[in-house]
Amino acid sequence: MDQDLVIRRRVIREADLLLIRQLVEEEGAQGRSHISNRLCEIWNWRQANGRFRQIACRDLLRRLEAHGLIELPPKLREARRAGYRNRTSTPDLLDCRPLTGRLREFQNQIGIQLVEQSKELALYRGLVGTCHYLGYQQATGAQLRYIAYLQERPIACLSFGPAAWKIGARDRFIGWSAQARQQNLRWVVNNDRFVILPWIQIQCLASHLLGRAVRQLAGDWPRVYGHDLALVETFVEKQRFAGTAYAAANWICVGQTLGRGRNDRTHDQAAPIKTIWLRPLRGDFRAFLRQEQ
């Protein structure tokens, strides 16, 4: 290797490649996940919340193999195909009776709860998998999920996860360099799921929940992951939705996508055109995200 590589914000040197090759030779029979977990332990490669960066490490290993720098052991099981949707079912005993009215009638009875327990996660998976047009997909990277309740009755789900790697309109709006984006992208999150259950018809509920969820997110994220956030993004499929709720919740529409996947670096993933909406979480978000170390 003529020069060091930077993958997932980690510099990979010749000594690292020798270590990985040795691990593959000595422990490769235990599988690729074992190799990535061992590498995290050896490097002490952790997220801000202290957990090992296992998903990032697996991605790093795949990229090194794509560069021809290492050879990973055979897969013990087939990976999920691109676009795989987890199988889910409607939660048992779910109250699906229609509920209509104005927000002011219900506002004081609505709460938003962070999903932390396995029972809550099962409910979230079932609701999103059943009611969101994209279904439920297993998260990759840091993510927080929420369920909105009217008293004890679930009425909506939201989740926030890793931001898209490169989005022209967003990046121009921020004004950051490629280096600053690589260093500071973790201070941006993506609202990747938002669904109000179809039998809930409460006027202005969507914008109300978006506003409350973002305020709660700003406090929950540093508690869970150890650092603040500067910006939230989302993509609204243009042919399906107008983005009215985001506008009413003070999000800013900065443009639209080019019809490629949100992390498509090879320009070969056709996708619907989406409008790009941003919600700053601090007044100096531009200056903060433009910083280079």
Image: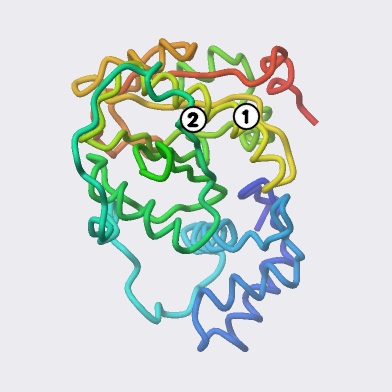
> Can I make out residue 58 in this image?
yes
Q: Which mark is residue 166?
A: 2
221 versus 236 height, above or below: below
x and y percentages locating residue 215 in the rendered image: 60, 26
- Mark 2 residue element: loop
Q: Residue at x 36, y 22 (%)?
A: 205
Q: What amino acid is found at the position of numbered circle 2 in the picture?
A: Lys
Crowding around mark 1 (Cα neighbors within 10 Å: few <14, some 14 to 19, many 20+) is many
Left or right of residue 226: residue 272: left
Q: Badges 1 and 2: C-beta atoms under 8 Å apart?
A: yes
The quadrant holding residue 123 is bottom left
Q: Residue at x 34, y 38 (%)?
A: 155
> Can I make out residue 265 in this image?
no
Q: CA distance from mark 1 to mark 2?
A: 8 Å
34 versus 198 height, above or below: below
Q: Earlier in the sequence, mark 1 or mark 2?
A: 2
Residue holding disc 1: 181
x and y percentages locating residue 106 in the rendered image: 39, 25
